[in-house]
Each structure stands twice: as structure tokens, then as C-alpha cells.
Amino acid sequence: MKTSGNLKPNTQVHPVPKTKDLRKTVRLKSVLTAMALVSIVVLSIFLRYEDFIDWQKNKPLFQYQGEYVMGSLDAYINLQHAKDLSEGTYDSLDEKRNIPNGAERPVIPPLLSLIAVALQKITGLPLSTVALFLPIFLSAFIVPLVYDLALKLNFSRAGAVVAAFFSVISITDIARTRIGFFDTDCLNVVFVLLNSYLFLRFAQAQGKRRLRFLIFAAINTFLFYTFWYNASSIVFLSFLVPLFVSFIFYYPEKNKVYVYGFLILIGSGFVYMMKDEVLSMLNLVLGNNQSSFHLQEVIGELVPVGLTQYMETTYSNSLLFLMILTGLIHFFVKQKRKALFLAVPMVLGLLPFFAGNRFLIFATPILALGIGSFVELLFRVTSRKHVKFVYLACIFIMGLGIFSNYHKITHKIQEVPFIKSKAILDPLQRFTPENANIWTNWGIGHQIHYYLDKNTYADGEFHGEINYYLHFPLAADNFALSANFMRFYGEHGRQGMEKLYALFKTEAKTFGFLKTILSREVEEVSPILSLGLAKGEFPKAQGLATVQEWISFLYPEETEDIYLFLHQIILQSPTWFKQGTVDLETGALNGEAFFQSFARLQKNQNSIFNNEFKLDLNTGQALTRTGGKFSFPNILTLDGQELRKTQLGNRSQRITSSPYTFIWNSNTGYGAIISGDVARTTLMRLFMQENGHGYFEPVSLNTPHYQIWKVKGKR
């Protein structure tokens, strides 16, 4: 062999590492990777735990009845399930919710509640304590799953670690899985992604080992079904879609005919069983509301998001998002078929653009894999001798991620909602009898049931139709209609409404009839019913053929007391007005929902004022600190005895009309500017005028904090 210069024949420019050194290097990489993953898990737990540091410093604020409150309102439904399971009273029908019909519960108890009860038995900790901390630990299961999934998608260790890191720092994900959020969001993403992972392993495995992953996927789907019991269509799609991908693209050609037959059978069965839920989901995505109760636009979680909000509520950095998009393009180009296994989480991650931010958490693993794929792209375009700069880039990218999100995460993305409402539960307990029926906003329904063990008409699990029934009497402009409807619904519930729908054919016609009848006294109704039945304007049915039968149905005897619970939290949002006045034919929201309240008002000779508001009594002109300008021809004053109307300004300068009303209580110093549409409602007249006119009997009035009324109905 010829040599050149001084280079010896046996000289090696890049000597091959010895086997012992290679093993040492591999072992070191494994140790460093394990340490990185453990650190990410610890970081995940801390980011979701850190709120509790403040809670401990302010225990009186964050505790109720000797235990810490939950971080979300819906957490209480899972806590109630767990409480009933622990006490042995769990049943498939909860008779204290959605009265008088009750609320159906899964025959198989929800898995999240079962886990909490099991941990309570093992640790001896109070159930509420277990529920408080459980979500922050369960949500950390995403870390090893994303890491191993990335490896199976041919990511390097570094790319997989970066993906795992970003799977735990999404702002929305942390907001929905932090301390006290005893809700299914802590594992929903994990279950969906785990099915994708298991079917990918099923496709990659050979021989009988494949069957193991198929069995694991079936078990995972069953557990997922018991965990997220009210979203069964998503549960089964997370199983079926990757199943179809694996059998269509990764199964031997010789058996394709049988495979396609099997898939058609499975798919047809799913469509038949889940058609209503799937259609509902499609209509939600397409914006086609098939229900007469058009209430999605006033439910925050169902409001679609734009790209800017999508970015700001995930990783909150334009550069990071550009990296993610670049990485996803690279991922789809390189992976092609394998990317199809992630079809379900990808589609769910896109739903926020069409169906609301409720589904933003499902974008987390896809975006995390996108940033991991960007790292893989960096490795691909970087020469081997400069690869250390890619590792430095990984550190920079992770640092940029936590820097961009940490400020938002640690500055309370959302306040604990129950903090505002816990103070008003005590008077409800004190002034209403045991097992009372409470008519109030759905937002505190779960808490009334859990803490006070009282019956409620609606809570966070019920939307649409039930919320319309709840708010319709509050937004009505007639005391008799409001009270009589509440008595009617309190007796017959949803079944009574469905009976009327069958007779009048549409919801709009049914409520038109109810407004005509229930807004009157029984004595006035008889001739109207008699004439309507005679002319065929009102339908007849078995048990509803005579005037007396209709009266008995519409004006039932008062077998149970109903207590209307009004409080300041209801007034802070226009939801009750919008949901109670929505047009059942067009979905249009009727009237202007405006309400601005002021406390500690004072009065002198020329004005009514506080540090946020001033009304000139000589001109009728009012200014607010936020820049609002209003004009009033008169004001309403409640002095504890009667409501008085006072004309403002002299005759020549007097304002003739205004779309707004100003009313205040001279004894309490509480007042408000109210739009005319809202001022005429039963809720507002009760709250601001404190007079039920015989249809509502005062039980405890502590305006502006709360009011409790007993619903009397017909006088």
C-alpha cells in the first residue's frame, strides 16, 4: 500500500470507539435522558401546584367547611360522584340534580372518581384533599408517553425530550389541569394519544406480539370510556381511526378482503350507535345549530378562537410558533403514513378554530411533536462536527418556551371561581329548609348539592335546553308568568315540556302558549282555554281535553317549596338575560343586556355620587369613571318602604326619554344603570325593587349580596 507524506498505513483519522467506551457512552446518555424526563415531570407537577402556595397563605379565603375549595366549578360533579361512592350511596340516577327529573349517571362509576376513592382508602387522606392534588400528578403521564411516541416516530433522544418538555408547559393545558381541577382534562389527552401510540406499535410489531398492543388499545379505550363518559364518540373515534390506519396500511395484502369487510362492519356499527353524537359534533364544527335553544354563543368554551388567541393560549411566542409550524411540515413530509395515527388528536387540536377553546388541550401533544420535529430538522441540516450547536439550540428552545409561558402561568390565568360564591352559601343553608329546591344560576349548582345537600334545577353539566328553562322565568317581564312557569316546571320538569312540544309541534309555539296562559290568574285563564279548545286553536290529548284538565296541568298544587336564590354573581354576567330571551325560531338575542352597578352611593342637594359615578340631579346627566355618559329623565328611589319616581331637570331642559334606567336604594347606597329591556325583567325588578307582588315571598333580602324568595305562583 502506498502512503502519502508522513501518514502511516495503520493510522486512523477517526478511530472507532472501543466496545467498553461505547457502552459507557450509551449508559451515560440513558442516565441523562432519564434525569431530563424526571426533571420534566417535576416541572409539570410544580407548574400545576404553585397556586397552592398562595392558598396555604390565605386558608380562610381558599377553604370552606374546613376543606380547600376546588379550582373549577365542574370539579364538584366528580367530587360528588366520589363522595357518593365513598359513602355507598352512588346510584345511576341522582335525584337531587336537574329536579324534578333527576340526573342520569353512568352505571359504571366514573374512573376519575374511583381512583380518588381508592387513594382515599389507601392513604387515609380526606377525599377533598385527594381530589385537590390528583390532577397535577395524573397530567404528568403525558411526559413518558410523548417521549416514547416520539422515539417510535424516529425522533432522536434530544428531539423526543424537547417534545416531552413542551407537552407540559402549554398555558391552556396547565390552566385546565392545575391544583383543584378535579376534572377529566388531566387524562383526556393521555388516553387519546395512548391509543395512537398503541396502534403505531401494533403496526410496527411482527407476529403474535402485535396482538398484545391491540388488546392494550381495547383496554385503554374501555378505561377511557369510563373516564370521559359524556364524550363517547371521541372515545371510540380515538380507537377506530388508528385501527383503520393500521389495518389498511400495515396489514398483509393477501388478507385485505377480510380486513376491509371487518372494518366496514366495525365502522357501520359505530355510525349506528353514535350517529346522534357524531352529528351533534359535526353541527358544532360547521356552526349548524339543529336545536331551537341557540345558546352556544353565550357559552364561553364554545366560542371559536382565532390564530392569535390560539398561539397566546398555548405557547405565547411567535418565534416558537413558527418553529412548531416548520417542524410540523417537516414531520408530515417525512412521516406520511405514520402521521395518520395521530389523526384524532390533530383534528381535535384544530377544533378550537371552529367549535371553541374547550378542545385546545388536545393541540398540546401535536404542537409538542412539532417543536420536536423542528429539532430533528436542525440535526438533519447540521454537519456532524457542529452537532453540539443543535444541543445548545435545544436548551435555548426549551428556555424560550418556559420564559414565554411562565409569567402567564404563575400569575393566575384564571381565578378560583368558587371564591366569589362561597360566601353566599351560608345564608342559603341558614334560611332554607333541609332538602329545599333551589332555583338559581347553574354556575353554583354543583356546590349547592355538594356542600349543602340541597336540590338544584341545573348545574354545569346541563346546557342548552335546561338553561333556557332556568333563565326564561328570570328574564320574563311578568311576575305571574315567571312564578307560574317555575311552579309548572318544578312539578313536571322536562317531561312536561316534551308533552307540550308534542302537542304544539314546535318549541316557539309552546312558549307562545305558555306566555299567553301563565301570565294570568287562574280565573282569567278559563275563558281563554275554553275558547281556544272550542275553536281548535289549542290541541287536545288524553288527560288534556277539558279546561279543568289543562288548568290542573298548568297550575299544579304546591306540593314542594321552591326557593329563588338571586345574588350579585348572576348580575355580573348577561348570560341569564341572553339565555332567557333568545328567539327560539331564529336564535337572535333579543334586547340590550346592560347592567352597571355602584355601591356606597351618597346623595346631596345636587347629585348622587361615589368615586366611580356622578349623577347631576338638575340636568339628569350622569358620568362614570370609565367614561360612560348617560341621560335620565327620571330616577327610581327605594327607601325601604316604597319605590318613588323623581323627575330630573326643569321643564324646559328635561330629557323626554332614555333607553336606560337609574334605580338606587337610599338606605343601602346601592344603585345601578340598567337598560330598559333588563329593567323590565322579573330578576331585576325583584333585585332592585325588593317587591314580589305576592308571586314571590321574601325570605331573606340582603341586597346587593343576595336575596332568597319563596316562589308562590298563583295568588
Image (cartoon, helix red, strand yellow):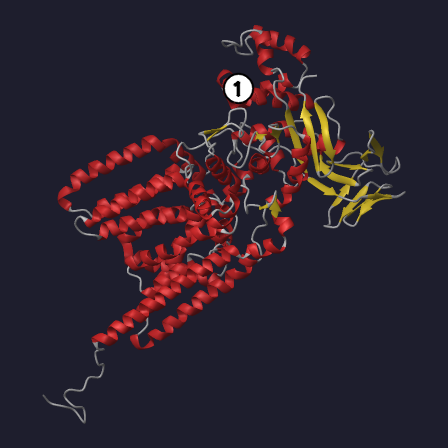
x, y (%) of residue 162? 39, 63
Q: Quadrant of the C terminus?
A: top right
Q: Quadrant of the N terminus?
A: bottom left
In the rendered image, the vertical position of residue 72 relative to residue 375, given as above or below: above
Identify the residue under disc 1: 496
Can residue 307 be seen from the camera position used here?
no
Q: Residue at x 50, y 44 (%)?
A: 127
Q: Exactly how many numbered labels are in the figure? A: 1
In the rendered image, the vertical position of residue 547 relative to residue 251, given as above or below: above
x, y (%) of residue 359? 45, 46
Q: Which one is in front, 371 or 418?
A: 418
x, y (%) of residue 144? 36, 57
x, y (%) of residue 550? 58, 11
Q: Which one is in front, 90 or 164?
A: 90
Can residue 414 be seen from the camera position used here?
yes
Instruction: State the image quarter where residue 168 is shown.
Output: bottom left
Instruction: State the image quarter where residue 444 is shown.
Output: top right
Identity, as a three-letter code, of the amino acid under mark 1: Gly
Q: Residue at x 29, y 75 (%)?
A: 384
